[in-house]
Image (tube, rainbow, N blue to C red):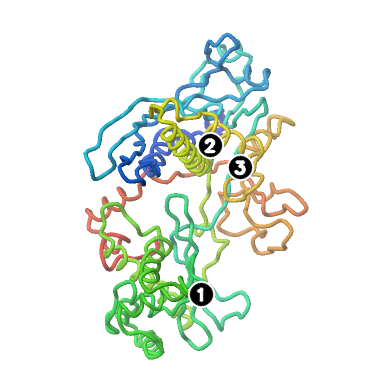
Amino acid sequence: MNREARRTVSREYFSRERLAEHHFRSFNGFLGHGMQQVVDEKETIDTDIGDKEGEEPVYVELGDVRVVTPRVREADGSEERLYPQEARLRNITYSAPVFMEMAVVVGGYEQEERMVDSTETKIGRLPIMVGSDKCNIAGFTDEELIELGEDPADPGGYFIVNGSERVLMTSEDLAPNKILAEYDAKYGDEIQVAKTFSQRRGYRALVLCERNREGLLEVSFPSVGGSIEFVTLVRALGLESDEEIVRRVSDDPEIVKFMLENLEAASVQTEAAAIEELGERVAQGQGKDYQLKRANYVIDRYLLPHLHEEGVEEEDVRVNKAYYLCRMAEACFELALGRREADDKDHYANKRLKVSGDLMTDLFRTALNKLARDVKYQLERANMRNRNLTVNTVVRSDVLTERLEHPIATGNWVGGRSGVSQLVDRTDYMGVLSHLRRLRSPLSRSQPHFEARDLHATQWGRICPSETPEGPNCGLVKNFAQAMELSQGVADDRELKRELQSMGVEGIPGFDGAGATAD
């Protein structure tokens, strides 16, 4: 390739559209299907109206959500198009109204329902990324941008909140829903641990399967204090017979020997007894009926939530959870026998990056839950005062707006994270590009974390080896390599799994008994 051709390729690759493309693609995906997905998850807003005798139940049904382009309401009440430069100069937020179809339904789920009020109402305002599909300057020519006071070379990819330009930092995280086997940090290779960060609808649960010094397996997961015997838990999930438990873990003679030790040490032999023992752990001192109810609730909700799937029977979900735990047990035994090496947490195959759209999805989910609580309160108050139950009178749009704008303005994100949004570095043009292509690790800056700070071989071609700050952030704040492109996950991984299954691929989690694999 001659010099002129190289220059043409380079100029095209490093154009304004390409440098912040991962931000645009992610945020546009959030606008296109991410917001609607969160609303579909919520589906309804339930109320306490109807608890009293003779009172008809009331709930709110949620429908389609849509976002328009940024607008500003003037003092005379008129709404005008808002452009980024105007937002900067007037110290206002570059945001667009969000509308949602909502319907107040009286009569509850079982009785004959009747619609009291159904309308599309404004639920709040959403900050819009400069240069995204909903941005008012998207697709403008250089001349039109100059006329509006915009820099044609500006890459976009950031938000404007109260006149300040804020960029959402791409965040590194361990891959969810994937089994990672490692040795215990305190006791070394004497104790083997298989763990998975089970994630579904914004909820993240750490599930640990640990093989202790005696060779016995124990499982720990949220809402259960301490750990539970592996055999007890899989029996509670529906695998009762010794033969089936061993077969689901492995056919290897040495692993079978380890499993027989666990079965001999097991304190329960039936599914009913296993659920009783779990109930005593999660609801100590309570009545037996409540203990059983609580035990079933805990294993259905908090244990491996990512294996839940719409339209799948609860019994099948439990069996899939048991198979998944068997795979975790197999990983522990293979590590103990030296059949596999401990997984490297710093290997980039074991990491995922959360970009603008992922971060905004987390934020919108929290904001919608807050709005739902407020709508519930307003409906109940209106009902007590015998007022008409209409959507427009119970929805306060500033509730959602505040929950969306404040985290972007301060950087304090949901889940207790800080520094997620930062002021765009406007020192020079290269500073802007560097900031847009920066990523950060969630690890504490005050701890050594030597291995996490090291340059890893799998960062080749992905992460710049030299651009990292000095001091406490060294190796934890990184930048994308020049020619790096970030691939985005498919909108619905279930569709991908169905497609793979139709092609004859076996071992897909959630689809068949043999398929409780990690990834």
| Of 196 and 482, the residue lying toward us | 196
Q: Relative to residue 481, is residue 396 depicted above or below?
A: above
Q: Residue at x 47, y 86 (%)?
A: 215
> Looking at this view, is 79 or 487 the one in front?
79
Identified by mark 2, the residue type is: His
Q: Amino acid at mark 1?
A: Val
- The CA distance from mark 1 to mark 2 is 36 Å
What amino acid type is highlighted by mark number 3?
Met
At a point 69% along the width and 49% down the height, the residue shown is 466
Of pointers 3 and 2, the one earlier in the residue sequence: 2
CA distance for labels 3 and 1: 32 Å
Residue 116, quarter of picture? top left
The quadrant of the picture occupied by the C terminus is: bottom left
Residue 193: which numbered mark, if any?
Answer: 1
The image position of residue 207, as x and y in percent, is: 47, 67
Q: Is residue 401 left or right of residue 339?
A: right
Around disc 3, counting alpha carbons within 10 Å, would you say few (fewer than 14), some (14 to 19), or many (20 or more)? many
Classify residue 93 by image quadrant: top right
Mark 3 → mark 2, Cα distance in angstroms:
10 Å
Q: Which residue is mark 2?
A: 23
State the residue position of label 3: 169
Asked if residue 373 can be seen in this view, the reply is yes
Pick whichever of labels 3 and 1 is earlier in the sequence.
3
Mark 2 element type: helix
Local crowd size for mark 1, using a 10 Å CA cut-off: few (<14), some (14–19), many (≥20) = many
User: Residue at 33% of width from left, 27% of height from top?
Assistant: 117
Report the number of numbered marks: 3
